[in-house]
Image: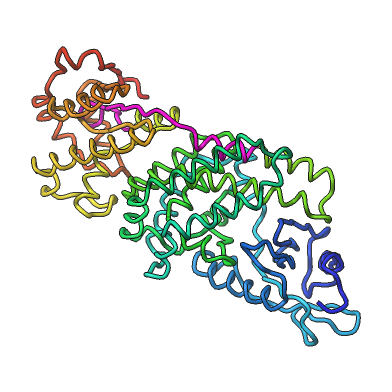
């Protein structure tokens, strides 16, 4: 900038007369460690701070202009109603103007302003963020990832050496906050976990690249970057300034949203989002890398919050709040790295007996992975979950494949430390036997939750069911009841019967 400091620029943009349109006074300024956003009423204006943190460099006017244009280009496809244009801030003498002739001293991103109460973070704080909205978010993120691009260059960022660089940088940039916002023990154990993960999981990272799970993702998917506006959910503020932060495993994005909900004390909502997403995508293998990225995302929030301690423009009271917030995030990052014990739960019962309803509630309560046979079956058949399956996906051979895949996934996830709920009829002893044998051989806790209700109630439920991925119809019930194999003496100790007649 010429003859004007950043602080003076902020003061200019806070003045109503700076804007060529009516504004709502006073103009509110929202600052982060890298930007400032000015809320004027109908429009919001974003400028980037002249900072260089290594992982981003906005130190020159040219770089700030470049990255604002990048931000516009990346967010237009997902939020075209919000992202409008880049404008210069020009100087004529001592006068600053927006988008007029003269020498450009700064650039600003003009956006359509939506009410701040539309942010998912605001909805959450107001107690208005619902389970159904979280489910819709899970589906939206799944669709978003399906449409994002990947190629050999992008997939190269899934190599351990490149992923590890960001982790190493995080630790290098935060050791100075030991004793201020985190403990030596947390720092050392969090770092040791990631070092071990990278050393031992080479094949897993290779599979993620080969399965095209490294994509141009969002990169910063937490509640403050999601809004519900005009009855539509928008993902916005994608990472534009650093390729390694956006050319990432799709679970990197998922981990950020789950971590944010966890940090806000709502692991149940994080669980609902996670289970919705993975059911839509079928990416249950991705759960193996989720804890690594959850820890990383919590650590990043701790790091950027810590950076506020070094900003001379931030008030002391805000810095004290930042220390507490950073401490909480550092602790959370460490907690994700701690060893966890898995558990296996089988749902059992006829169609309409409430298995999935019970399983969904239980999963949210104990933070379990909920695997529905209906989803597994359709992913095996490569048909959309929203489509009705034909008779070819309900043959004995396909059912055998479905139950085999269910158990395979269950074993993988239990070994990774997850509580897992396998949600299917489990009406045959041979299918239950595999789960029992695994649990007993590995000394894994096992439960079989048998849901039951009168046939007329099951029939009514199936008759009125809508919007569900299950294809079951009332005419199947008599046959299901006839072929259900009763629990043996060996199975009985694991069985808990749930009468769902009154609903659940």
Query: Residue drawn 59% across and 67% down?
Result: 241
**Percent x, y of residue 81:** 56, 67
Is 499 rendered above or below residue 213? above
Magenta part of the protein: which range?
328-356
Q: Is 231 in front, or is 225?
A: 225
Residue at 35%, 30% in the rendered image: 359
| Image-quadrant location for residue 34 | bottom right
* Residue 232 showing in the rendered view: no
Q: In what quadrant of the picture does the N terminus appear?
A: bottom right
In the rendered image, residue 426, in percent from the top left (x then y), is placed at 19, 29
Residue 95, above or below 415: below
Question: Compared to 97, does 424 lie above or below?
Answer: above
Q: Residue at x 73, y 41 (%)?
A: 323
- Residue 36, image x, y percentages: 73, 61
Q: Nearer the viewer, residue 486 or 82?
A: 486
Residue 98, quarter of picture = bottom right
């Amino acid at each position: 900038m010429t003859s004007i400091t950043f602080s003076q620029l902020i003061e200019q943009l806070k003045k109503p007369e700076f804007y060529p349109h009516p504004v709502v006074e006073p103009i509110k300024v929202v600052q982060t460690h890298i930007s400032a956003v000015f809320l004027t009423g109908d429009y919001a204006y974003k400028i980037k701070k002249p900072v260089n943190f290594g992982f981003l460099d906005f130190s020159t006017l040219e770089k700030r202009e470049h990255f604002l244009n990048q931000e516009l280009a990346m967010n237009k496809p997902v939020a075209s109603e919000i992202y409008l244009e880049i404008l210069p801030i020009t100087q004529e003498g001592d006068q600053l103007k927006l988008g007029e002739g003269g020498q450009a001293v700064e650039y600003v991103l003009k956006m359509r302003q939506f009410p701040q109460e539309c942010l998912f973070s605001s909805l959450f704080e107001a107690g208005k963020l619902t389970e159904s909205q979280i489910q819709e978010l899970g589906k939206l993120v799944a669709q978003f990832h399906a449409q994002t691009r990947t190629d050999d260059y992008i997939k190269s960022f899934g190599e351990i050496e490149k992923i590890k660089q960001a982790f190493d940088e995080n630790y290098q940039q935060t050791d100075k906050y030991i004793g201020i916002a985190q403990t030596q023990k947390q720092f050392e154990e969090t770092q040791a976990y990631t070092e071990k993960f990278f050393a031992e999981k080479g094949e897993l990272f290779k599979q993620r690249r080969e399965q095209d799970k490294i994509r141009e993702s969002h990169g910063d998917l937490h509640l403050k970057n999601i809004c519900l506006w005009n009855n539509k959910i928008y993902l916005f503020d994608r990472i534009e300034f650093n390729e390694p932060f956006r050319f990432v495993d799709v679970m990197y994005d998922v981990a950020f949203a789950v971590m944010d909900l966890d940090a806000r004390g709502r692991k149940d909502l994080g669980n609902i989002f996670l289970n919705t997403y993975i059911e839509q995508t079928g990416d249950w293998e991705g759960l193996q890398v989720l804890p690594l990225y959850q820890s990383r995302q919590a650590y990043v929030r701790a790091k950027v919050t810590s950076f506020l301690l070094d900003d001379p423009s931030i008030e002391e009271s805000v810095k004290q709040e930042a220390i507490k917030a950073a401490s909480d995030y550092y602790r959370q990052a460490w907690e994700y790295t701690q060893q966890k014990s898995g558990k296996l739960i089988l749902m059992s019962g006829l169609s309409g007996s409430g298995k999935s309803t019970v399983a969904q509630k239980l999963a949210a309560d104990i933070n379990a992975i909920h695997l529905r046979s209906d989803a597994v079956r359709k992913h095996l058949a490569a048909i959309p979950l929203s489509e009705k399956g034909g008779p070819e996906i309900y043959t004995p051979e396909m059912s055998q494949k479905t139950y085999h895949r269910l158990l395979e996934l269950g074993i993988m996830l239990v070994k990774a430390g997850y509580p897992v709920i396998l949600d299917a009829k489990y009406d045959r002893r041979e299918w239950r036997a595999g789960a029992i044998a695994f649990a007993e051989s590995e000394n894994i806790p096992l439960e079989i939750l048998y849901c039951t209700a009168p046939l007329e109630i099951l029939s009514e439920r199936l008759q009125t069911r809508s919007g569900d991925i299950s294809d079951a119809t009332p005419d199947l019930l008599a046959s299901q009841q006839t072929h259900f194999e009763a629990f043996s003496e060996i199975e009985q100790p694991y069985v808990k019967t749930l009468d769902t007649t009154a609903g659940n």
